Image (cartoon, rainbow, N blue to C red):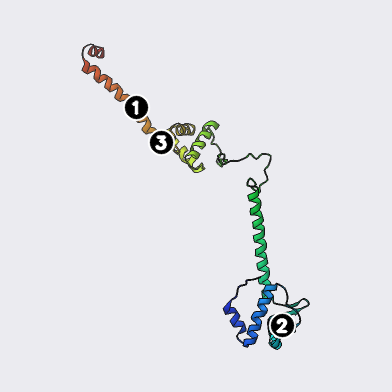
């Protein structure tokens, strides 16, 4: 490791009692430990020479005994070992992620999902429409599919709540749910209100009455034969 986190407050609280030489020895021992990522040599004289303090072997030995533990492999530091293990874990994780990324780049069509016999290819223009609401009783499949398609095109969700609302309004208008959905498809409505249907009916009735009255008026005003005809 060429880098490790150094907590100044934590270090000072544990090394306040050290002499200047012991403090230097500890810092250099840690640097050597992290750099090599393995236990320090069991020979104190060898270690003191490696960190440039061969004339202060006693101080080096004191620091080793306080902050390190002597094993068959040499002097170890438990806390440093944890940091090194964490560092290596991050490297392995980054390596796996890099290999996976390289594999995706080399095979852009690979998604990592194994297709089944029933799976159809999906393109950007072909996305499956998930319909979680079953067709209501009394509604033909063709009308149901047309209404679902209309809702999807207008970005309106197909929910049971929406069906219940349309059915409720259909009852108010005195028509079946089948007729209500057919009307929605014919007129491009995503929803249905009884008032809408009544308004349309009244509008057509009003237009018809206006046409009849207009004809009658023309006949009366025209006089002559028209008056006689109207009088019969």
Nearer-N-terminus badge (3/1): 3
Q: Residue 161 appears at what percent x and percent y?
A: 49, 43
Q: Residue at x 28, y 19 (%)?
A: 215
Up-down relation of residue 209 to residue 74 (above or below): above
Query: Whole-percent x and y of residue 10?
Result: 59, 79
Relative image position of residue 70 (x, y in whole percent): 75, 80
- Give the residue pinned by disc 1: 205
Snapshot quadrant of residue 47: bottom right
Could you tell me which secondary element the residue under label 2 belongs to?
A: helix
Q: Toward the viewer: 190 or 79? A: 79
User: What residue is shown with label 3?
Assistant: 194
Q: Using the numbered discs, state the Cα–Cα distance from disc 3 to disc 1 in whole angstroms.
A: 17 Å
Badge 2 density bin: few <14, some 14–19, many ≥20, Cα 10 Å: some
Observer-nearest residue: 102 or 82?
A: 102
Left or right: 106, with 187 as reference point: right
Q: CA distance from mark 2 to mark 1?
A: 109 Å
Residue 140 in view here: no
């Amino acid at each position: 490791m060429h880098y490790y986190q150094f907590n100044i407050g934590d270090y000072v609280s544990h090394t306040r009692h050290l002499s200047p030489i012991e403090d230097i020895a500890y810092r250099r021992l840690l640097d050597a430990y992290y750099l090599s990522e393995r236990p320090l040599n069991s020979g104190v004289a060898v270690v003191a020479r490696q960190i440039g303090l061969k004339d202060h072997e006693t101080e080096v030995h004191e620091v080793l005994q306080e902050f390190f533990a002597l094993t068959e492999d040499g002097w170890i530091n438990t806390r440093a070992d944890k940091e090194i293990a964490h560092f290596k874990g991050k490297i392995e994780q980054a390596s796996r992620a890099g290999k996976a990324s390289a594999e995706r780049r080399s095979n852009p069509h690979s998604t990592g999902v194994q297709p089944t016999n029933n799976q159809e290819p999906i393109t950007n223009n072909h996305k499956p429409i998930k319909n979680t609401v079953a067709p209501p009783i009394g509604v033909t499949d063709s009308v149901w599919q047309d209404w679902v398609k209309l809702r999807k095109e207008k970005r309106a969700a197909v929910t049971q709540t929406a069906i219940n609302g349309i059915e409720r309004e259909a009852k108010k208008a005195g028509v079946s749910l089948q007729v209500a959905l057919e009307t929605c498809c014919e007129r491009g409505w995503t929803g249905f209100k009884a008032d809408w249907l009544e308004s349309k009916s009244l509008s057509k009735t009003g237009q018809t009455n206006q046409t009849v009255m207009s004809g009658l008026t023309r006949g009366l005003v025209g006089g002559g034969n028209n008056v006689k005809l109207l009088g019969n």
